[in-house]
Image (spheres, rainbow, N blue to C red):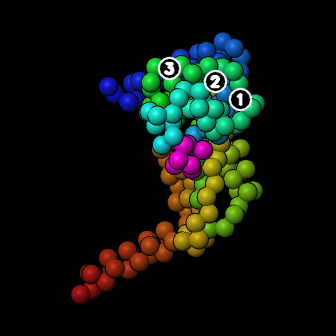
Amino acid sequence: MNTGVVSRRYAKALLAYVKAAGVENKVYEEVQAFSANFVNVPGLRHAVDNPVLDVRTKLNLLREAAGGKGVSKELLRFFSLVLEERREKFLQFMMWSYIDLYREDKNIVIGRLTTAVPAPKLAKKLEAISSEQRKGNVVIETKVDPALLGGYVFELAGYRMDASVANQLKRVEQQFIAKNRRIV
């Protein structure tokens, strides 16, 4: 069975269910926390996929991964359904699909800003400009990469703007090599 199809269907069902209950924002935050824990804690995936563990134990693990005791009853009910139907191997993909569907529904676009040094003012400014241009919400994820030497690389909706010193030096080097080939 196709992982993407199953995951997408479950994610659509979850989104419709939590929208009807009016808790889609809370579930979105819980799903983000769960996805981060699922990636960062490799033992969690092994425990959830373990056929020896009973459903109750797995449900407790999933609750803790999504935020502990304060997890919404809607998400817990979803986890129960997934475990009852023995679809836990698709759970990570379901959560990623839910995040994508939620962002699509709320018109949220994720941008990535990579800088040589931390630049929170630049991130806020780019977020404001991008939100205004796209007429929607833009969330900028920042990353620091000293290899850029200076400047930044900004990616948003398939577009990339590379204003880094490393890229400029690379272009100068390529121009220098091209001109020297003509001389030789």
- The numbered disc on residue 5 is none
Mark 2, Cα crowd under 10 Å, few <14 / some 14-19 / many 20+, is some
Mark 1, Cα crowd under 10 Å, few <14 / some 14-19 / many 20+, is some
Q: Quadrant of the N terminus?
A: top left
- The numbered disc on residue 84 is 3
Q: Quadrant of residue 20?
A: top right
In the picture as drawn, the residue positioned furthest to the bottom comes out as 184
Measured as percent of width and height from the top left, residue 72 is found at: 71, 24
In the picture as drawn, the residue positioned furthest to the top comes out as 20
Q: Quadrant of residue 107?
A: top right
What's the amino acid at mark 2?
Answer: Leu
Which label lies toward us, 3 or 2?
3
Q: Quadrant of the C terminus?
A: bottom left
Q: Which residue is mark 1?
A: 71
Frontmost residue, 173 versus 117:
117
- Region of the chain picked out in magenta, as a range: 37-45
Q: State the CA–CA distance, disc 3 to disc 2.
A: 12 Å
What's the amino acid at mark 3?
Answer: Glu
Q: Which residue is mark 2?
A: 76
- Residue at position x 71%, y 17% in the image: 22
- Residue at position x 55%, y 69% in the image: 148
Horizontal side of 155 relative to 184 (left or right) equals: right
